[in-house]
Image: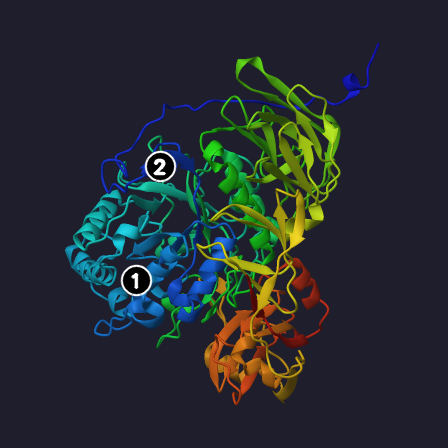
Amino acid sequence: MTTESTRWPEPLSVRHQGWTTPLSRPRMANDEDVRPGLALTNRYLSRDGVPLIPVSGEVHYSRIPRHRWAERLRQMKAGGVTVVASYIFWLHHAEHRDQVSFEGDLDVAAFVDLAIETGLEVVLRIGPWVHGESRNGGFPDWVQQAPVRHRTDDPAYLELVREWFGQIGAALDGKMHTVLGIQLENELYDQPQHLVTLKRMAREAGMSAPIWTATAWGGADLPETEVLPLYGGYGDGFWVDADAPWDPTFRDHYFFSHVWDDAGIGADVRRAQAIEAASGGPRTPSELFPAATCELAGGMATAYHRRPRPEALDVAAIAHCKIGNGSAWQGYYMYTGGTNPPGEHGMQESHATGYPNDIPRLGYDFHAPIGEAGVLAGSHAELRRQHAFLAAFGDRLAEMPSSLPAIRPTGVEDGETLRWALRSDGRSGFLFVAWHQPHFPLSVHEQARFRVELDGGEVLEFPSTPIDIPSGTLARWPVNLAVGDTTIAWATATALTLLPGSVPTLVLIAEAGIPAEVALAGSAPVIVEPGFTPVRFGSLDVLVLPAGTAGSAWVVEQPARRLLLSADELQWDASGKVRVKAAETPWVRVYDPATHAFRDRDMLPSVTVSGPVSPVVTAELVRPAATAVPNSYGKHDGRPSAPAPDVFDELAAVYRLTLPAWAAEPSADALLRIDWAGDIGELRIDGRTVTDRFWDGSRWLVNLTDVGYHPSAEVTLHLLPLAAGSPVHVPADSRTRLTTVDNQLLEIDAVDVQPRYTATEH
C-alpha cells in the first residue's frame, strides 16, 4: 500500500562532516602577546576556556563627532557587536607633517578607553595605507608625493612609516594592553615580507596585541603564522562599471560555500594601481587559523557613477551565509557610517587623486546599520538577531564545522536549488537556510523536507510534512539542541537566544509562511502557535515569537541576559541599563521567565522641548536649477566623473530651509529628513557645506546637532538635477523614476524635522 509519506519528494540530505584537521594552537595569542584568559586555536577564539564567536563592527572615530562616540558605541553594543574596529587614518591626523593631532575627534586613546568602558573589545587597523575611500588610501599628500616606493620595504618609505607608527604608539601609550587586535596594511597582495616588517616596526613603536591580522582576499600572499587571514563579502559594489551587470563575485555571497576568497573586493584599488589579484593564493582559510572576516557588507558606499542601495535582507543574508559556512568571527564594514573631516583638499578618494571612482566629499553613510546621522537602518534589526544567536549559542557553534548538502546549486545563476547548510559537532547542530538575493528575486521553494545524518548513524528527518519556503527566509533551526535534561530534536523556527531561570526559556522566532513545529527527542512533533506565552517542553520553556515581531526583538547580555520588545531604538552600555531613543512616548516590554510573560518596562523620560512640536520645514526656492544640465561631466578611466564644485554651484538649485524653533534645542536632538530626487545634494549651514549625498532613492537623514545647526543659522539645500540621459547607475526604482522625465529630474518630495528624545529605565 502506498502511504502519503512515500509520495513526498525525496528529502534534502546532508551528512555531518567532521573537522578535516586536528585541533591546534598557533603561536599567536598563545606563546606571543599572551593575554590572560584569551586563547586562539585553528578553529576558534576562546576566553577562560570557553569558545566564542566575536562580532566586530567598523566605526571610524575620526568620521564621528566626539560627543557622539558614547552613543554610537552603545548602539553597536545593542546591535550585538562585541568588538569595534577602526582605521587610524594618517591623513586625518597629519594632513600637514608639522601639524600632527590626536586631540578632539582624533583622540584615539580616548576612543579606545570609551569602547572598553562600554564593554567592547577593540581592533585597530593601523595601516599605514588603509583606504576606506579616503584620499590617497589614507596617505597625507606629503607622503603620497614623497619620492619613495610606497607600501614596500624601501628604507625611505619605512622612515616615514616609523615616524607615523611612533606617533600612534605615543598617543596610545598605556592603552595597548586593552587592545584585542591590530591589522597591518590593507589589501596588500604580494609582499608578505613587508607585513612582517610592519609588524616589527609596530612593536618597536610600542604597539602589540594578542591578534595580528591582515586582509586575505584577492589571493593575498600572507606571511604564514604571522597574521590571522581575514576575509570579506559584499553583495554589491560601487567599484564596477556603471553599465556592468550584477557581478558573480557579489552573487556568490548569497550561497553557502567553503571558499572564502573574494577576488572582487579591492578591484578598484588594483585597477587604479594597474595590478592584478594575486594568483595562486589560497581561497580557503589557513589550516593554522579559523575562518574569520573583517569586511562583510554592513552596507555599501556610493560612487558617482554607480550607486548601490542594499536593503536590510541583502546585508543579513550574506552574514547569515557566512555563519553557516563556518565563520568563527563575524566582522562588518561599515557598521557605523560617518562624515569625513573637511580637509584643505578634501579627504575623500576621487578621480582627482587617480582613483577610478568619485566619492562624496563629506558623506560616508555607507547605508550602514547605524547611518551617518546615527539612525538605525533595517539591517540593524536583521543583524542583531543573528548576533543574539551567536552570543547564546556561539560556545557550541564554534566547535561545529560546516557541512554542505549532497545537492547544491550549480552556480550563481541557479535560483531553483535550495541554499542550505549544517553546522554540527556530530551530535547536535543548527540547520541554516538562506533563500534571498537582491536584483533577481527567488520564487517560493516548494515541498522542502530535510534529512540530517549525524554520527553513530543517527538520522533526523523533518518537518513532519513538506513545507514551502518563501523568498526572504533566513533560518537557523536547532537540531538535537540540549538544554539541561531536555533535548529539542528539531524545530522549524529560528533560534534567537536562551534565557536563564529556574526553568530556562528557549526563544525562537517563527518564519513567515512556515509552521513553527517543535519536536522533543523521542516524541511526536507539535505545531506551536507563535505568540508571547511559552510552551513547556520537558523542563524547558519554548517561546516562539511571531515573525512580525522579529524587528522589535532586543537581547541584553549583561549583567544577565534579558529579552525585550520595542519598536523604538534601544541602547545600553556595559551596565546593561537600557536607554530608549524615540520621537514619541516609548514602549518597551521585557520578558520575565519567572512569570512566563512580558511586562511593560517603566522608562524615565528626558527633558523635552519647549512649546508644541511641529515637523514642518519650509523649503523656499532661492535660485532655480539650470534648465538643462549635461548628461556627462567628463570621464576618468572610462567612468563618469562628478561635476567640479564650481560647476555644481553654477547648475544646482538652492532652497532656503526654515525650521521650527524647537529644532535648535539640544534636548530635541533633531533629525532633518529629506526625500528628494536628482543627482547630487549638499546641505549648508551659514554657507558651509556640512554633508553631501549622491541620490540613490533613499531618504537623506541629517542630525542637526552634529552639523552645527543653531537658532540663527541659515540652512540651504543645494540640489543638482540628474539628466534624463545620464549614464550613472542607480537602483532600478530610481532608474524607473528617471525615465518618466523628458529632460532632467529634480524634485523635493518632502522635508521635515523629527525630535528624538531619550528615556532611561529606572
Check the image and report above or below for 463 versus 306: above
Query: 179 and 334: which one is in front?
Result: 179
Q: Residue at 39% of width from left, 54% of height from top?
A: 85
Q: Which mark is residue 570?
A: none
Snapshot quadrant of residue 538 = top right
Q: Amino acid at mark 1?
A: Ala
Q: Decide: few, some or many residues near mark 1? Use Cα within 10 Å; few <14, some 14-19, many ≥20.
A: many
Q: Residue at 74% of width from left, 28% of height from top?
A: 466
Q: Amino acid at mark 2?
A: Asp
Q: Which residue is mark 2?
A: 48
Q: Quadrant of the C terminus?
A: bottom right
Q: Residue at 36% of width from left, 75% of height from top?
A: 343
Can residue 635 be seen?
yes
Q: CA distance from mark 2 to mark 1?
A: 27 Å
Q: Is residue 37 left or right of residue 417?
A: left
Choose the circle earlier in sequence order: 2 or 1. 2
Can residue 643 be seen?
no
Q: Quadrant of the N terminus?
A: top right
Task: Give the colour scheme of this rendering.
Answer: rainbow
Mark 2: which secondary structure?
loop
Q: Is residue 684 left or right of residue 465?
A: left
Q: Which residue is mark 1?
A: 109
Q: Nearer the viewer, mark 2 or mark 1?
A: 2
Q: Position of residue 328 (x, y in %)?
A: 43, 38
Q: Position of residue 744 (x, y in %)?
A: 66, 75
Snapshot quadrant of residue 3 = top right
Q: Position of residue 247 (x, y in %)?
A: 54, 47
Identify the residue at the far top of this view.
1
